[in-house]
Every structure is written in structure tokens, then in C-alpha cells.
Image (cartoon, grey):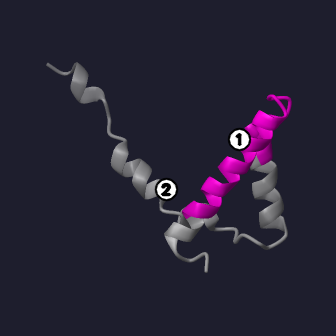
């Protein structure tokens, strides 16, 4: 099931949402990034998520598409 990029992206965004909710409920005593990292680690260690989750998510392709060198702005 997690071989489709849309499902992988959904799992990653769900981890982000859970981290934000816990951070808001704890009034930032527990940082959202801590929840995201620990949740990701636990899900990988337990085998719920495959180890190649991030490369399969297509986030890298989106990042390469949106990022472009800004050196052309300074050339005139």
C-alpha cells in the first residue's frame, strides 16, 4: 500500500499534524519536531513504515522542481 506516493505523502503529513496537535495541547512544552521525529523512528523500527519511505514519497522531486538557483537575479 505504501508504494504509491500519495499514500506515503499522507502518512508524512499525518505525522506532521499529530506533532502540531500535541505541541498545541502541551502549549509547546513538547516540541512538534520531537513528536514527528520520535513517531517516524518508532513507526520505522516497528516495521509499520518501510525504511525507504522518504525516497518513495516524491517530496524530493517536488523540491527539485520548486527550487532553482537564485544566481540569475544578481546577474545583469
| Left-right relation of 55 to 49 | left
Identify the element where label 1 is drawn. Answer: helix
Tell me which corner region of the image, top left, top right, bottom left or bottom right, holds residue 39: bottom right
Q: Where is residue 51 in the image (x, y as percent from the top left)?
A: 70, 68
Q: Give the range drawn in magenta.
A: 9-35
Question: Which residue corresponds to the image point at 76% horizontal and 48% vertical from the top-left?
Answer: 37
User: Would you place residue 28 above or below residue 5 in this image?
Assistant: above
Residue 24 sits inside the magenta stretch: yes
Distance of label 1 from label 2 (alpha carbons):
20 Å
User: Would you place residue 6 above or below residue 72 in this image?
Assistant: below
Residue named by callout 1: 20
In the rendered picture of this protein, how many numbered marks are placed on residues? 2
Question: Which residue corresponds to the image point at 80% horizontal and 29% vertical from the top-left?
Answer: 28
Residue 58 sits inside the magenta stretch: no
Q: Where is residue 17 in the image (x, y as percent from the top left)?
A: 67, 48
The crowd level at tag 2 (other Cα within 10 Å; few <14, some 14-19, many 20+) is: some
| Left-right relation of 61 to 55 | left
The quarter in which the N terminus is drawn is bottom right
Q: Between residues 69 and 37, which one lies in front from this camera angle?
A: 37
Q: Where is residue 65 in the image (x, y as percent from the top left)?
A: 34, 50
User: Would you place residue 72 above or below residue 1 in this image?
Assistant: above
Tell me which corner region of the image, top left, top right, bottom left or bottom right, holds residue 25: top right
**Residue occupying the far front of the picture:** 25
Q: Where is residue 15 in the image (x, y as percent from the top left)?
A: 69, 54
Q: Residue 59 carries which label?
A: 2
| Left-right relation of 66 to 17 | left
The crowd level at tag 1 (other Cα within 10 Å; few <14, some 14-19, many 20+) is: some
**Residue occupying the far bottom of the picture:** 1
Q: Nearer the viewer, mark 1 or mark 2?
A: 1
Amino acid at each position: 500500500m505504501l508504494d504509491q506516493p500519495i499514500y506515503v505523502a499522507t502518512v508524512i503529513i499525518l505525522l506532521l499534524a499529530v506533532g502540531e496537535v500535541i505541541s498545541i495541547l502541551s502549549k509547546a512544552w513538547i516540541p512538534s519536531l520531537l513528536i514527528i521525529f520520535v513517531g517516524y523512528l518508532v513507526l520505522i523500527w516497528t516495521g509499520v513504515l518501510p525504511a525507504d519511505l522518504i525516497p518513495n514519497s516524491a517530496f524530493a522531486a517536488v523540491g527539485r522542481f520548486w527550487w532553482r538557483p537564485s544566481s540569475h537575479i544578481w546577474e545583469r
